[in-house]
Image (cartoon, grey):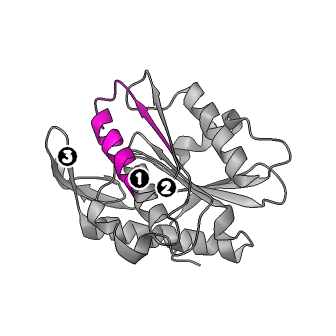
Amino acid sequence: MSDLLPYEEVSTGAKPTASVIWLHGLGADGSDFVPVVPELGLPDDLAVRFIFPHAPHMPITCNNGYVMRAWYDIVFFDQINRHADRAGVLASVAQIRALIAAENARGIPSSHIVLAGFSQGGAIAYTAGLTHPEPLAGIIALSTYIPAPELLEGDALAANHATPVFAGHGTADPVVPMLLGQQAMETVQRLGNPLSWHTYPMPHSVCLPEIQHIGAFLAKQLA
């Protein structure tokens, strides 16, 4: 499928039985989280294929039109709210669905696929995961928020109403305030998804305890 986003790929075994599609943050790229894989502490008998896609380059309005890798444009933001480009969010959701379909074609059912993302990538993981037409194994949302809550309505949520969610956030995050993460948590809880919420004494980043908690979540959901 030549129209797929380019990506980095890492497998923890010769014959993967599950996949994790992990989305980077604004201005980063797919290589950003590749070093995390060995730190997850996954069981030796769990073969997982990690897909780390590169977001397209686009101008970001709130950054004076500077071109960088991004999952959608942020038109502007106030102290708390990010005003995301809804059409851009939907375009990225479609690209993630194409990656899921590609994994399905490689023999991995959607029920063995986890969507993960950090910051802007986590916003797409939330949206694509909760609205995917087939049940997924889980959603991992790190230092992030829900960019377009109006998309999380109606029948689009039927397939993943029970999909477990892991959400982590730094208590000293100056980029995505923890209040945004808490608002997303409350939205997911209202939808009825099982959610585990974790906070860490860190800024806009990840830390080893969080990575270890993610590894435990993956081991449980992909066993």
- Residue at numbered disc 3: 81
> Element at badge 1?
helix
- Residue at numbered disc 2: 193
Pick whichever of labels 1 and 3 is earlier in the sequence. Answer: 3
Q: Is residue 106 above or below residue 208?
A: below
- Residue at numbered disc 1: 188
Using a 10 Å C-alpha cutoff, classify the residue at mark 3 as few (fewer than 14 neighbours), some (14 to 19) or many (20 or more).
some
Pick whichever of labels 1 and 2 is earlier in the sequence. Answer: 1
Determine the CA span between mark 1 and mark 2: 6 Å
Using a 10 Å C-alpha cutoff, classify the residue at mark 1 as few (fewer than 14 neighbours), some (14 to 19) or many (20 or more).
many
Tag 1: amino acid: Val
Q: Nearer the viewer, residue 79 or 138?
A: 138
> Element at badge 2?
loop
Cβ–Cβ under 8 Å for marks 1 and 2: yes
Q: Which residues are magenta?
A: 166-190
Q: Is residue 90 above or below residue 172?
A: below
Residue 9 appears anywhere in the view = yes
Determine the CA span between mark 1 and mark 3: 18 Å
Determine the CA span between mark 2 and mark 3: 23 Å
